[in-house]
Image (cartoon, rainbow, N blue to C red):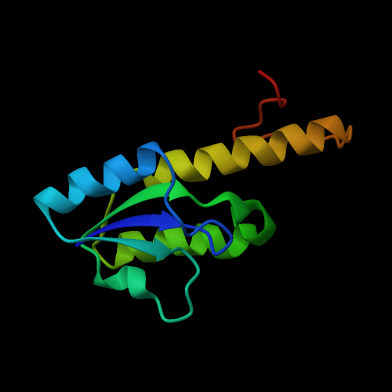
Amino acid sequence: MIGLATSRELPELSGGEQLLYQELSRRAACAVVIWDDPQEAWRSCSQIIIRCTWDYSNHLPRFLTWIDDVEKAGIRLHTLQKLCAGIVTRRICVILRRAEFPFRTRRGYPVGR
């Protein structure tokens, strides 16, 4: 089954997302899954496409753990795990930089280079 991962706040499909769901459903079973569902319905998927997990920033450690859990479960995540983690990390760097918090990245480069 193909899962379209979303947040609890935005479980309904809209516009182009409905077209995506319809097209995917023609090819295989498809379901909308909540990324932080306590029942972990996403585990029944063989593949997951991240649709709109807008609340990830409010639950960052749990979201990053979820990305790892998906990978460990052998579920293909079409939005690459490392890309997701990189986007989240860059966002954190921007927030810290705006707050004028002095730090360097793991590779030792000043933020913004």
Residue 52 percent location from the top left of the image: 49, 48
* 62 horizontally vs 96: left or right: left
The residue nearer to you, when weighing 56 against 7, is: 7
* 43 horizontally vs 67: left or right: left
Against 9, is 20 above or below?
above
Residue 100 percent location from the top left of the image: 89, 32
- Determine the residue located farthest toward the bottom in the rendered image: 39
Residue 2 percent location from the top left of the image: 23, 57
Q: How many marks?
A: 0
Against 63, is 90 above or below?
above
**Would you identify the image quadrant in which residue 97 lies?**
top right
- The residue that appears at 66% across and 18% down in the rendered structure is 113
- Determine the residue located farthest toward the top in the rendered image: 113
* 43 horizontally vs 36: left or right: left
Confirm whether residue 78 shows in the render. Answer: no
* 106 horizontally vs 79: left or right: right
- The residue that appears at 24% across and 65% down in the rendered structure is 45
- The residue that appears at 61% across and 55% down in the rendered structure is 55
- The residue that appears at 54% across and 59% down in the rendered structure is 63
Quadrant for the N terminus, please. Answer: bottom left
Confirm whether residue 45 shows in the render. Answer: yes
The residue nearer to you, when weighing 62 against 111, is: 62
**Would you identify the image quadrant in which residue 16 lies?**
top left
- Determine the residue located farthest toward the left in the rendered image: 27
The residue nearer to you, when weighing 48 against 72, is: 48
Against 85, is 70 above or below?
below
Residue 102 percent location from the top left of the image: 85, 34
